[in-house]
Image: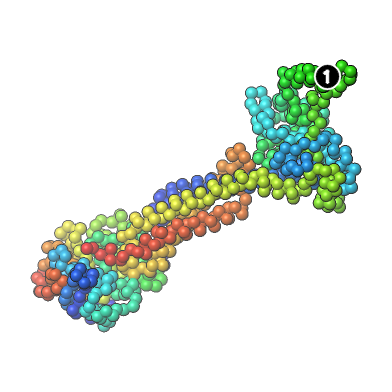
Amino acid sequence: MGGKGIRIEGLRKRYGKGDTAVDALKDVNMHVAPGEVVGLIGPSGSGKSTLLKSLGAVIDPTAGRMTLGDEVIYDDGWKVRDLRALRRDRIGFVFQAPYLIPFLDVTDNVALLPMLAGLPNAAARERALELLTALDVQHRARAMPSQLSGGEQQRVAIARGLVNRPPVILADEPTAPLDSSRAMTVIRILNDMARQFETAIIVVTHDEKIIPTFRRIYHIRDGVTHEEAGEGRPVG
Amino acid sequence: MISLAGRDILHGWGKFVFTGIGLGLLIGVTLVMAGVYRGMVADGRALLDNSGADLWVVQRDTLGPYAESSSVNDDAYRGLLTLPGVAQAANATYLTMQVRRDHVDVRAMVVGIAAGRPGHTPGWPPQLVAGRHLARGHYEAVADVATGFRLGDRLTIRRNHYTVVGLTLRMVSSSGDPMVFIPLKDAQEAQFLKDNDAILQSRRRTEANPALNRPGVPGLLDALLESQSTNPYVNAVLVRLQPGHAPDEVADTIRRWKRLTVYTRAQMEGILVGKLIATSARQIGMFLVILAMVSAAIVAFIIYTLTLDKIREIAVLKLIGTRNRTIAAMILQQALALGLIGFVVGKIAATFSAPYFPKYVLLVPQDSITGFLALQAICVLASLVAIRVALKVDPAEAIGG
């Protein structure tokens, strides 16, 4: 569960060597507390995707320190050994497109993660159904992803991101394909889930509709983050 | 843990089934090819079994009577009967030709059999499925049912007509041609008989030759003409041994005393399988190799395409922590499932189509098991390319940018 959220200090990422080296991240500092939803915004090429991949333990930073809950997961070149287990058990992902597995029904799309973590199928499905109920899509539990609306697919994707109760969720443009009303619904759900499960949620977005809902926003420009207060406009 | 491969197959079952059917037809052809080879071997063995002989006595230094032509004097059998260990010796002729009935002709092996009785005289068909055995010295025939002839049909062999009095089953040559049994004298004539014009020309030449038509030697010309119009040769003498005599020993005795070539059953089988159908076997072997390669290419292409279709899902699976071996197992299981569908379809196709092939197709369980294992091995190999691609997928691909 939540713990102390996620903390990033002096994170840097350099691509290439010598004259052709590019510093995608120069000095990233962030802290997201359990139960908090923060926005991460910035123009194209500012380093958002690199930061998201670093936070998601998909690429290795060049320097800095990342702490997830009480556990240091990266510290100046040192990193935890099993990144796959880290991604599976301690980081949730919600993508711009839902990217549900098309050959699994809704329940198994959500239950797959706990199954991969070793939970028995029945228990994993039970946990998935609890989340689907919380997200109000339990009535589509046996449906295939292709039979769902865009909003329903995104809710199922959120349920998949939450199902292993990770301390942090990384949401990459989760409202981009949705209209205004559905986008606000997704943000409301993320806020509710963050509070309910004490999860720290980082939402990368360009969406002007949802930016005013964040209490805190991190701007990233040329690989450097700047924190500022958001409007914290109430959602739904 | 749920079966990702099984779920994917169920989700896109149409694609799998139709690909499996296509692959299955290819596998069916492969099994039939193997069956054709088995059928050729079985035909060869049936030929030897049905002849009822323990030894084949043929012209010296030939591989007759089936693999090469062979001529043995038709009175040689008398001498063989005097040798120790020989119970029966009977002349036989073999001639593969077109046998006509009305306006239809059938490729058949015409076998001339010496007077005797079935089960006793070598060369006779062991049993009939309809009618009776030959009972007259001329113009009767016993035909295999594969010729399509029926009892009472009138056949034409050279210039003579024969009535079908009996039908046999699975009496075929090593190349699968059905047999037609006729009396020995008729068969000898059929091998030698020329048309009337050719006979007249031959007689005219002999009469015009002063060395052969000597006025001072009465009867010489008649004797020469008589010898030219008869055929005192047969292709082989079939020998049946008395109980307790070793074939090799009797064969050695015949070779020593009669200056003929003798083959035992094992040697004759070696000639049929090792020489007569060896080229066909190599040909079939080449086809099998090509078909295996085509099957591998198809499976590899299909699995590769299916994997490319799932690159984004594989990236997501890897991002959320799925092990590489789980993803590899999913692709491998799909390839094996495709192979299984292909094999089942192929086996059914081969089983139902085999009777319609003009040559005997013998499908043996051993070939099916070997084919199944080979196909699964091909599927495993074919899936390696797709697995390699899947394992190279970067989980970062699931994250935009």
Q: Which of B346 and B99 is in front in this view?
A: B99
Residue sitting at x 41%, y 64%: B328
Q: Label 1: which residue?
A: B213
Above or below — where is A213 with respect to B246?
Answer: below
Residue sitting farthest toward the bottom: A70
- The answer to whether one can see residue A51 in this image is no
Q: How would you rate the neighbour count of disc 1 (Cα within 10 Å): few for under 14, some for 14-19, many for 20 or more?
A: some
**Residue at (27%, 73%) from the top-left corner?**
A60
Q: Residue at x 59, y 39 (%)?
A: B357
The x and y percentages for residue A17 are 23, 71
Q: Where is residue B391 in the image (x, y as percent from the top left)?
A: 37, 64
Q: Is residue B289 visible?
A: yes
Mark 1 belongs to which amino acid?
Asn
Residue B109: image location, x then y, percent: 70, 35
- The reply, left or right, for residue A152 in relation to residue B212 is left
Q: Quadrant of residue A109?
A: bottom left
State the residue in front, B369 or B174: B174
Q: In terms of image quadrants, where is residue A88?
A: bottom left
In x, y percent, where is residue A200? 22, 74
Camera-nearest residue between B130 and B248: B248
- Quadrant placement of the N terminus of chain B: bottom left
Position of residue B365 in the picture relative to residue B71 (left or right): left
